[in-house]
Amino acid sequence: MIKKVDHIGIAVTSLVNTLPFYTDVLNLPLIGIEEVDTQKVRVAFLQAGSTKLELLEPTSKESAIAKFIEKRGEGIHHVALGVESIEDRIIEMREKGIRMIDEQSRPGAGGASIAFMHPKSASGVLFELCEKGMKG
Ligand code: CMX
C-alpha cells in the first residue's frame, strides 16, 4: 500500500528566516514555494535524497500550523506517505477502524491529492496519505 515516505512536514514561523539553514547549511535543492490557500499555509519543498522536506509557514492565525506552533513550537508536524488510488486507501483505513480527518481526498501542495489520519488513531503521529505529490 505505501510506496514511500513522500515528504516530512516541518512547521516554521518564517520561511524566509528558516530556508537558509536548509539551502545553505544542508545544501538541499529548493524545489519550489507555493501558497495553499485552503490550508492557510505557504510551503517550501526541498529535495532530500529520495524524499522531500516540506516547510510549512502559517499565513493565518486560524491555520492548523499556527495552532500547532502556538501549542508545541516549531518542529516536525507530519509524515506524508505516498500511495496510489488514495480514495481506495481511505476506505481501507476506515474499514480498519482508523479515524480519518479527511473522509475524502482534497487538493494539497504540488498538485497532490491528500488525506490526513487523526493522530489519535496513529499513536500520536499525524500521517498524511499523499498521491502524486510535487515531482513524484
Ligand atoms: N502531530 C501529532 N499530534 C498532533 C498534531 C500533530 N501535528 N497536531 C495536533 N496533535 C494532537 C494534539 O496534541 C491533541 O492531542 P491531546 O488531545 O492529547 O492534547 C490532538 O491532536 C488534538 O489537537 P488539538 O490541538 O486539540 O486540535 P486541533 O484543532 O489543532 O486539530 C488536527 C488537530 C490534527 C486534527 C488538525 O491540526 C488537523 O486537522 N490537521 C490536518 C490538516 C493540517 O495539518 N494541515 C496543515 C497543512 C498541511 C499541508 O498542506 O501539507
Image (cartoon, rainbow, N blue to C red):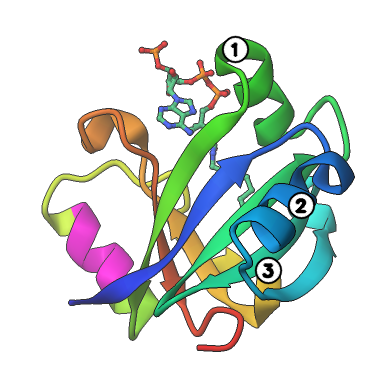
Residue 72 in view here: yes
Instruction: State whether label 1 is within 8 Å of ligand 1.
Output: yes
Please say whether residue 91 is one of the residues in the magenta stretch.
Answer: yes
**Mark 1 or 2, nearer chain start:** 2
Residue 109: numbered disc? 3
> Label 2 belongs to which residue?
19
Name the spot of residue 14 as percent of width and height, x first.
Answer: 83, 38
Q: CA distance from mark 2 to mark 3?
A: 18 Å
The residue lying toward the viewer, choosing from 42 and 46, is 46
Q: Which element carries disc 2, helix, strand or loop?
A: helix
> Label 1 belongs to which residue?
71
Instruction: State whether label 3 is within 8 Å of ligand 1.
Output: yes
Name the spot of residue 74 as percent of width and height, x first.
Answer: 62, 27
Left or right of 117? Residue 2 is left
Please say whether residue 121 is one of the residues in the magenta stretch.
Answer: no
Name the spot of residue 117 as percent of width and height, x first.
Answer: 36, 47
Q: CA distance from mark 1 to mark 2?
A: 22 Å
Q: Nearer the viewer, mark 2 or mark 3?
A: 2
Classify residue 34 by image quadrant: bottom right
**Mark 3 or 1, nearer chain start:** 1
